[in-house]
Amino acid sequence: MRNIINSVSVVVVSVALLAGCSDTEEPPRESVSTTQSEQAPTPEPQVAEVEPIDVTISTDVSLRTDRRLMVEGETNLPDGTQLQIVVEREISRVRWQARTGVADGIFAAGPFGSGSGLPDGGYVVRVEVAEASVQPQSVQALIGNQGQHLAGELVRQSRHGLGQVATYSRRFLVGSEPRQTRDQVEVLESPGM
């Protein structure tokens, strides 16, 4: 009798195991409501709409008594924006550069030039906004992580494919007797002359 009970037990267990391995699936039961609420998709946080910045930059270039150049300017870029200021002599392509940041809408850099001062001639001052990837997080939040919120005639695609950047340039002449030119340029005379 014991053999029969053991045989029946083995058959019942085998049938139960085979039933668990069948090809048909039972639809899931809705037994726990918390499981369904955990599976519900969480709403994505809404991203605030950022207004494009129509970039404006202006500069004031002044020649110090030692004939070295100071560059100051105004911009509507966010405070903390990193800029590179470049002064280049047209005839020789010699250049001086400095990094600076925007604070309360203004920036300043200098003095530019060698210790003996700038020789007379034509120069270009350029203000370059660094790529968004190297800007502080607070600036990236306003201009976009690829500079996509920058707009206006000063904005262009970065040479390195790192998004949009802005560049401003202005030409000026140093010296008391400027060369004849058809361009509209500012003439800086040495202080004290």
Image (cartoon, rainbow, N blue to C red):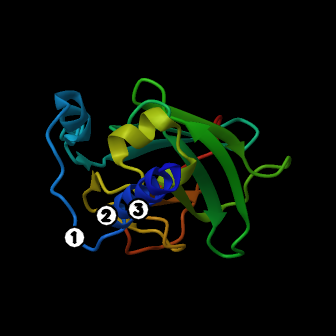
| Res. 19 mark | 2
Residue 70 visible in rendering: no
Q: Is residue 86 above or below residue 107?
A: below
Q: Is residue 111 above or below residue 22?
A: above
| Res. 64 mark | none
Q: CA distance from mark 3 to mark 1?
A: 21 Å
Q: CA distance from mark 2 to mark 1?
A: 9 Å
Is label 3 in a helix, a strand or a loop? helix
Task: Kindly indicate whether the residue at mark 2 contacts the one at mark 3 (C-beta within 8 angstroms).
Answer: no
Mark 3 or 2, nearer chain start: 3
Q: Nearer the viewer, residue 17 or 69?
A: 17
- Which three-letter amino acid code belongs to the residue tagged 3? Val
Q: Quadrant of the C terminus?
A: top right
Crowd tier of the residue under label 1, counting other residues whose Cα lies within 10 Å: few below 14, some 14–19, many 20 or above = few
Hey, which residue is sitting farthest right in the picture? 115
Is label 1 in a helix, a strand or a loop? loop
- Which three-letter amino acid code belongs to the residue tagged 2? Ala
Query: What is the quadrant of residue 33 in the picture?
Result: top left
Residue designated by label 1: 24
Residue designated by label 3: 11
